[in-house]
Amino acid sequence: ADAPRPRISVIGTGYLGATHAAAMAELGFDVVGVDTDPAKVEALSAGRLPFYEPGLGELISEHLATGRLRFTTDLTEAVAVSDIHFVCVGTPQQATSHAADLRFVESAVAGIARALSHDGIVVGKSTVPVGTAARLRELLGALAPEGVAAELIWNPEFLREGKAVEDTLHPDRVVIGGASAAAETAMREVYAAPVAEGAPFLTVGLETAELVKVSANAFLATKISFINAIAELCTAADADVTALADAIGLDGRIGRRFLDAGLGFGGGCLPKDIRALMHRAGELGALEVVGLMQQVDEINMAQRQRVVDLALQSCGGSVLNARIGVLGAAFKPLTDDVRDSPALNVAAALHLRGAQVTVFDPAAGDTARRTFPTLSFAAGTEDAIRGAHVVLLLTEWAEFLDADPVALGELVGRRTIIDARNKLDAARWSAAGWTVIGLGTRPTA
Ligand code: UGA
């Protein structure tokens, strides 16, 4: 007879953990999600998401109903009924340095180790500095009860916010680090469905697995900062960075994705990951990586200042008392996440310079207000831009790109829009009397 399917626990139910738990249930496994925060567990157990993520609430509700998914604060109980334990807790940036804060992964692994009552596999998914997994492996060995065989392996996650469910169920690849033959077999069973669909299954060393994750994010960040540096050159030389990206992107070795110039990257991953990489590479003496990532970070942050400067310029040098309508607060569309959001950063900078800034975001209004309570928020695009001297498009939500420039033109004080994501149909907006200012594109008159 077939061996029984492994039962799964997922420790940490943020973006990563909640999505992974739901995806594992969707693949047919019995899953229990664990979080130390009772409010989160209560919400998820009722099928409510503590954050915005398209499709995830539905998937969780579906598998609460099938009985394959449940949530608890009781780690010991969850570990007792599971065979594979995925560690999905956060590794935030430390307050005082660029290093990652590893307290949560350490306490998760220690907690699992102490709770083990039968053999198990601990699978790290959190993004960690290289070398962490080896230390966690020692911790697991030291704390696991006598007679229980426990193995720690690494399985980085590449999901994007806003596309989390799709990315988890249909990954580009599955990377497994440091697995024994038995653990590899278990992982092949867990990921049988995506592998059957064609996702390559890659087995690598523990350290390589940790580095694959950060290198992927570092490369994506580098691509964005590269095109933003070229955008500066395009502005100086009267060229157009979007047309340029389309042309170079057709080279298969380059690729068009992640070559959108504009306000740059933000969110809970790319900025923190390149800084943590910088820090760890420094510790290990890999100084070229430090320099490269520093440059990527600097170019990225300069884009925010550039947009502030464009707003200042378009208001005649000072924004004091100028009415500015800001469209977008989230770090990208399809999320309510404002962690390190370039949009919120620019809105706040203009507010601090004395502008009357009104912000609207289709999903991130509440999270943005909690982060920056002194900004004013509108309930819709119209209210955000009414009477504005300049409008700033900072997050490229579809509803902004699809908005009617003729109708919106009636509401503003002056028809000037800074398209900080280079995503507006400039011809359509300028036909409606707007001046459209992009980054690395020529302003329309
Ligand atoms: C990123 C990676 O894309 C995921 O593969 C990874 O798993 C995740 O981090 C993580 O480490 O957890 P995410 O932070 O959700 O995912 O967001 P992205 O879609 O990568 O966008 C990041 C930022 O780059 C956004 O602010 C976006 O506006 C900006 N961006 C993206 C550009 O400025 N230009 C582009 O061409 C593309």
Image (tube, grey):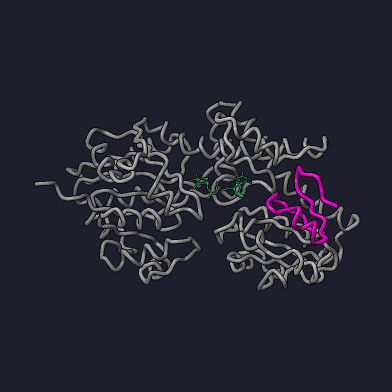
Q: Is residue 224 above or below residue 285?
A: below
* Residue with the most extreme left position: 1
Locate residue 52 relative to residue 169 in the image: left or right: right
Residue 171: image x %, image y %?
A: 40, 44
Residue 29: image x %, image y %?
A: 26, 54
Q: Is residue 418 magenta?
A: yes
Foreground residue among 396 and 159: 396
Residue 189: which quarter of the image?
top left
Q: Residue at x 34, y 59 (%)?
A: 33
Locate residue 145 relative to residue 425 in the image: left or right: left
Residue 86: image x %, image y %?
A: 34, 49
Q: Residue at x 35, y 59 (%)?
A: 34
Q: Is residue 334 above or below residue 269?
A: below
Residue 289: which quarter of the image?
top right
Foreground residue among 145 and 207: 207
Residue 55: image x %, image y %?
A: 44, 61
Locate residue 250 relative to residue 91 in the image: left or right: right
Q: Is residue 221 above or below residue 64?
A: above
Foreground residue among 437 and 115: 437
Locate residue 336 relative to residue 25 in the image: left or right: right
Residue 352 seen anywhere in this rendered image of the structure: no
Q: How many marks?
A: 0
Q: Is residue 74 magenta?
A: no
Q: Which residues are magenta?
A: 417-445
Q: Residue at x 60, y 44 (%)?
A: 97
Residue 209 seen anywhere in this rendered image of the structure: yes
